[in-house]
Image (cartoon, rainbow, N blue to C red):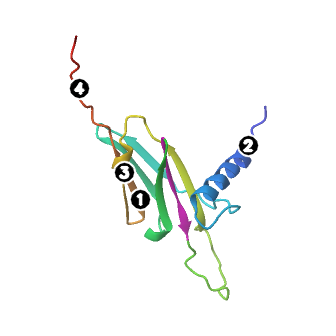
Amino acid sequence: MNWNPWMGLDMAAEELDQLMGEACPGGARGAAAVWKPVADMVEDRTGVTLRLDLPGVALEDVAVEIRGNELLVYGVRRSGSESSSNAFHVLERPCGPFARRFSLPVAVDRDSVCARLKHGVLTVTVERKSAERRIIPVD
């Protein structure tokens, strides 16, 4: 079997288009994500911490949502220069919609989600479920 670097991208684009269509009110449907922010997800004894690099993304342009056992992060990075009279010599920073989907471990408290955007890094924390001790009477 020959290696194809583009294999699977058509399926990923369809899934992302569906996610953007469901997630973005007003219908970003049909607008495939332009870029994919890099992320780190770490689980420790207190819970799960997710960090995404979102430089240049405004607070009002990012959303975090939990659906079932998945954490969704989506939004848009707007272009810094909207003028069409500019002559761009280098244009490497991607702009436009993005979406990421992460599976959460079963042992987290989905009601404890906290998200913070600071210095271009979105940090999302989800606490581990507390192990409730329950004494069961024996008859």
Instruction: Report whether 109 appears left or right of 135.
Output: right
Discs 2/3, front:
3
Name the disc covering residue 113, or none: 3
> x and y percent of residue 102 in the render?
50, 45
With respect to residue 2, does 114 lie above or below?
Answer: below
What distance separates the C-alpha of mark 1 from that of mark 4?
Answer: 37 Å
- Viewport quadrant of the C terminus: top left
| Residue farthest along the front direction in this orientation | 139
- Between 6 and 87, the residue placed more toward the observer is 6
Q: Residue at x 58, y 81 (%)?
A: 81
Instruction: Report whether 68 appears left or right of 43.
Output: right
Name the disc covering residue 108, or none: none
Q: Residue at x 66, y 53 (%)?
A: 18
Report the magenta residues as a range: 69-77
| First of labels 1, 4 by sequence position | 1
| First of labels 2, 1 by sequence position | 2
Name the disc covering residue 7, or none: 2
| First of labels 2, 4 by sequence position | 2
Name the disc covering residue 134, or none: 4
Estimate how packed mark 2 is, as few (under 14), some (14 to 19) or many (20 or more) residues with alpha carbons within 10 Å. Answer: few
Q: Which residue is mark 1?
A: 122
Q: Residue at x 54, y 68 (%)?
A: 77
Discs 1/4, front:
4
Q: Amino acid at mark 4?
A: Arg
Secondary structure character of the magenta stretch overall? strand
Q: How many marks?
A: 4
> x and y percent of residue 121 in the render?
41, 60
Q: Amino acid at mark 2?
A: Met
| First of labels 3, 4 by sequence position | 3
With respect to residue 134, does 112 lie above or below?
Answer: below
